[in-house]
């Protein structure tokens, strides 16, 4: 019997890598929570479920220290987390809560992204949709424009099980 | 790197407390699957054995044409003892709203989609819910997305219940009723 809140897998990069993948995710839990503490060579952080390149959309609210804005993407090939400043040594913190990931509904998730660089950076909260009723068995963390995750980047996937 | 070590230590704490079918610092208290068209679901007889409460929900309603607010009430209190604020993004702009001295619902945090295969989701946190010397404060992140529909939104909200009583029941309400596939899961978070 799974615990209520337990780590499923953790990846800590020993060297730069183009992707981080959690595969063969069991359907044992109710929700998934992904915690990403990352630095990268640049680009936009994004994820895909089950290697799918279709069916994503999201709505976000963002504050950059000057203003608050909201935007959206529709019919997109990936689910963007946030941009990652090039060559940063200060990690960003991202979380992704995926609800009913093994259920038969479209998959909705809540995402947070926090990044501060002592004068730049942003805080972002968003809701994301993968319009697909398949159970999620794989999550890939990727970067745009052939960028890479830096050594030391850590990603942990948790499972949350209700009563 | 210091932040890798910090995160790994966090994982270790969860590892040490997470095994055993629910034992640990984060425990499942109860789950409610809404009855068809039920307008209110209630967690009752909530024990005071935790430090904080969290509710994770995935829900939609029987309103086929528009969004609905999700309202929250503590201990069945229907007096004007609540207030709330929200920061919202609808894909076009960011805006804030709120209300004071609200009677029935204390927190209208998220709009729910019409019945379908796409659901609204949210996470509600209630801090120090059993402390009898404090008014109660809650926060929620919630949202829904339907690939460009004008009703999509991301909400961050806070709410207060101006009452120092320990919270022993927690209700969620919507106007037309929840679909019978809506699920509300209550968790308890322990202190040291």
Image (tube, coloured by chain):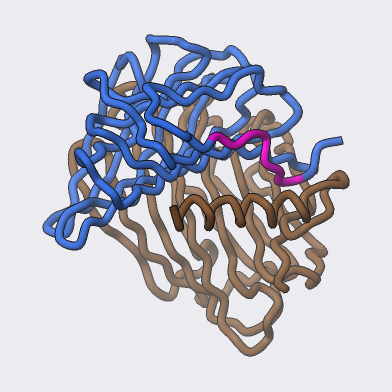
Chain colours: A blue, B brown
**Quadrant for the C terminus of chain B in the image:** bottom right
Picture layout, residue B1 above or below residue B82: above
Residue name at image x 49 percent, y 50 percent = B4
- Please state the extent of the stretch shown in magenta in the rendering: A4-11
Residue name at image x 60 percent, y 42 percent = B57
Q: Position of residue A6 (x, y in %)?
A: 71, 43
Asked whether A159 or A153 is in front, the reply is A153
Can I make out residue B127 in this image?
A: yes
Quarter-of-image position of residue B67:
top left
Residue name at image x 52 percent, y 62 percent = B105
Q: Position of residue A56 (x, y in %)?
A: 38, 19
Asked whether A99 or A1 is in front, the reply is A1
Residue name at image x 45 percent, y 50 percent = B141
- Residue B176 in the figure: left or right of residue B24: left
Q: Main secondary structure of the magenta part?
A: strand
User: Which residue sits furthest bottom?
Assistant: B133
Can I make out residue B146 in this image?
A: no
């Amino acid at each position: 019997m799974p615990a209520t809140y337990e780590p499923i897998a953790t990846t800590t990069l020993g060297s730069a890598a183009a992707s981080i993948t959690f595969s063969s995710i069991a359907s044992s839990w109710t929700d998934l929570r992904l915690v990403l503490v990352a630095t990268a060579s640049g680009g936009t952080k994004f994820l895909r479920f089950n290697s799918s390149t279709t069916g994503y959309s999201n709505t976000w609210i963002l504050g950059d220290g000057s203003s608050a804005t909201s935007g959206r993407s529709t019919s997109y090939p990936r689910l963007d987390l946030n941009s990652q400043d090039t060559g940063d040594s200060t990690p960003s913190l991202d979380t992704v809560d995926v609800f009913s990931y093994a259920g038969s509904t479209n998959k909705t998730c809540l995402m947070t992204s926090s990044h501060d660089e002592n004068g730049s950076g942003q805080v972002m909260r968003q809701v994301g949709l993968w319009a697909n009723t398949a159970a999620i068995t794989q999550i890939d963390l990727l970067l745009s424009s052939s960028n890479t995750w830096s050594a030391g980047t850590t990603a942990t996937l948790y499972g949350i099980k209700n009563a | 790197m210091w932040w890798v070590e910090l995160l790994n230590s966090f994982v270790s704490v969860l590892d040490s407390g997470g095994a055993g079918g629910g034992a640990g610092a984060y425990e499942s208290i109860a789950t409610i699957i809404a009855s068809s068209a039920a307008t209110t679901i209630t967690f009752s007889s909530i024990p005071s054995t935790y430090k904080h409460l969290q509710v994770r929900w995935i829900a939609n309603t029987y309103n086929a044409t528009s969004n609905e607010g999700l309202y929250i009430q503590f201990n069945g209190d229907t007096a004007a003892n609540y207030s709330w604020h929200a920061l919202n993004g609808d894909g076009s702009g960011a805006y804030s709203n709120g209300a004071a001295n609200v009677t029935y619902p204390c927190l209208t945090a998220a709009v729910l989609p019409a019945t379908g295969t796409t659901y609204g989701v949210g996470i509600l946190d209630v801090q120090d819910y059993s402390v009898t010397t404090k008014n109660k404060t809650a926060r929620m992140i919630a949202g829904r997305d339907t690939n460009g529909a004008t009703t999509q939104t991301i909400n961050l909200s806070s709410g207060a219940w101006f009452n120092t009583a320990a919270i022993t029941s927690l209700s969620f309400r919507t106007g037309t009723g929840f679909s019978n596939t809506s699920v509300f899961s209550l968790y308890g978070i322990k202190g040291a």
